[in-house]
Image (cartoon, rainbow, N blue to C red):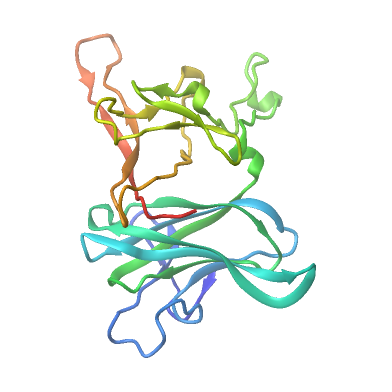
Amino acid sequence: MTGGRRFQVVRDAGGVEHARIHVTLHREEDLQWMNPGFAEIGYTVPAGLEGDWYVFATLRSGATAELDPTGAYFGIYNPWFSNGIDMHARGEIANYPITARQSENGQWRTVCLGKRRLFPGARLWVMPGILKEAEYVDVREFALVPPALVEKSTPGARDAKDTKDGAAAKARSIVVDWRAFDRAPNVRVQEDRIDSFKYARLAAFDTNAPVESVSWTVKPAEAGEWDVFAKVRIGAAFAFDYDATTASVTIPAARRAGGNAAQTPVQDPARVHITGCEVM
């Protein structure tokens, strides 16, 4: 990673290095808004990595307000081609506001800009917002993930070192669609009118048919440590809904080893807010 004049590398309590930027809102001589030379953390795509990728960033911020609608921005500048001609300039193809909350300060969050075609020289960047001051904006990593891993389940390699008794290795990715969802009562399966894919809809406006959740239960063969993502879209009932829904990972209560009556409590190791004003 590289960045502007406020770019720095710091080390957290666990010894992990990450990039950090910080700006004040009232005492800066430089232009604060979208100024890569001043406050930016980024990565430039080199030759050899061009192609279609799902683009991720793992970041966190230190909000000074209960809710900051634009704690940071995550985006892409891509080389600009017109009718196949390189214009020797870069244009912005993505710009995603990251909502920050004081209750989530210090928690790492991975966000995605979807599938993007990147050319050599494309710049992935994170810059601070200017509505409210943040104590810091940290970036741990950017990730470019092949579409095949995100769009369909991908089995692991069949290698003697990675298999036991001839069984296939653990999958590299597991993609779950509407067929496998644990649908609560009144959840509807619908088909997109343009792209013809099916999805589950939680419609909260019908009080005669309330909807609680759409979920998926991990099977024993799928247990393990995973990065977990959900493709979600919101039809907000009003503008700037910052609490449209939440996504979470829940570990149910279970009996402890030995079969005695003591139980581990229900755990919520991950819970994120999904706003109704993020357009992807």
- Residue that appears at 32% across and 41% down: 246
| x, y percent for residue 116 | 62, 55
| Residue found at the far right of this picture | 84
Quadrant of the image occupied by residue 215: top left
Name the side, left or right, on which 83 lies relative to 225: right
Q: Is residue 152 above or below residue 98?
A: above
| x, y percent for residue 236 | 35, 48
Name the side, left or right, on which 261 lies relative to 132: left
- Residue that appears at 29% across and 69% down: 135
| Residue found at the far top of this picture | 259
User: 197 or 253, which is in the foreground?
Assistant: 197
| x, y percent for residue 263 | 22, 18
Q: Is residue 2 above or below residue 26?
A: above
Q: Is residue 271 visible?
A: no
Q: Is residue 191 visible?
A: yes
User: 265 or 134, which is in the foreground?
Assistant: 134
User: 168 or 46, which is in the foreground?
Assistant: 46
- Residue that appears at 74% across and 71% down: 82
Name the side, left or right, on which 25 lies relative to 224: left
- Residue that appears at 67% across and 77% down: 89
**Quadrant of the image containing the N terminus:** bottom right
